[in-house]
Amino acid sequence: MAPSQPDILFDIKNAYYIGNFQHCINEAQKLKAGSAEEQQERDMYMYRAYIAQKKYRVVLDEVDRRHASPDMLAIRMLADYLASGSDINKKDQVVNQLGELLASVDLPSPILLLMAGYIYNLQQDLAQALRILQNADSLECYALQVQIYLSMNRPDLAKNQLKHMQEKDEDATITQLAQAWVTLCHAVEKRQESFYIYQELSDKYSPTPILLNGQVYALGCQGKYEDADTLAQEALDKDSNNPETLINLIMLSQKVGKQPEVGSRYLTQLRDSHQAHPYLVNYMEKEQEFDRLTMQFAPAASI
């Protein structure tokens, strides 16, 4: 049997998975891919990295919807959806276009199914996202299913998807990350294992906000708040506007006894830059509910 050829896109993919998005873009721009398929796959990871950096306009300007392949068009739709912000009508329009795209393709590729899964997940239509993803046999599609099941508080189903990933490629970075996610849902003694997975990936490649925040969460679950705060500050140094970092710092500022205004600053920064983040949406709903109850039970004004 002939030895398998090395994946020339390995560094690009790996940088994307661990959240080193600028490195992913830099490597993609340097790589001279041979076949047209390799060129498109390289460009898809590059554009996804731009999306992760919230540079949606790059994708929208460069991917021509009239001539793009279904896979590239789906990536453009994700950029368009995220660029819509709080415009619900625009988002619904993108979802309708996505439905038309899926219906027009006889055998959707894993990347098309993955982008569709992302968009339906963002729409909170988890059932539709899972229906689409179950037709795909790729590590990334399995990983998204793991995330969705964990968000539904179904770690048992997430663990089943993780087994599929391990059977396909146990050593892949994205499989290791999925294992860390699932392990965090187990008992406290298992959460240390998750910390070590993130630490090993950081040592092997480079610490990124995604890997550091994973360690922060693992330490926080074990009550090691001071250590978690140290790593959260390191993550902040790498990306001062990362929403997960800001959320972790909001929570840790209370746990380590910092002044209230410290947590308030992080919350203000989150409000300014990430208004559509699920954490902030939920926080603002609770805040409005609290204000409503305060008004309801306030003492009547004296005449």
Image (cartoon, rainbow, N blue to C red):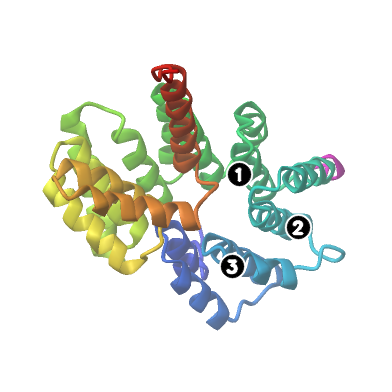
Q: Position of residue 58 (x, y in %)?
A: 66, 71
Query: What amino acid does circle 1 point to?
Result: Tyr
Residue furthest out toward the front: 303
Q: Circle 3 sits on which residue? A: 55
CA gap, disc 1 to disc 3?
17 Å
Q: Of label 3 and label 2, which has the lower sequence position? A: 3
Q: Secondary structure at mark 1?
A: helix
For residue 118, the mark is 1
246, above or below 132, in the image: below
Secondary-structure class at tag 2: helix
Asked where in the image residue 268 lies, by quadrant, the reply is bottom left
**Residue 73 circle label:** 2
Q: Which label sits on residue 130?
A: none
Q: Which residues are magenta?
A: 103-107
Find out whether the residues at labels 1 and 3 contact each other: C-beta distance under 8 Å. no
Q: Say above or below: 168 vs 85.
A: above
Task: Identify residue type, mark 3.
Answer: Lys
Name the residue: 40% across, 20% down.
298
> What amino acid type should be assigned to the residue bearing mark 2?
Leu
Q: Viewer-proximal residue, 124 or 188? A: 124
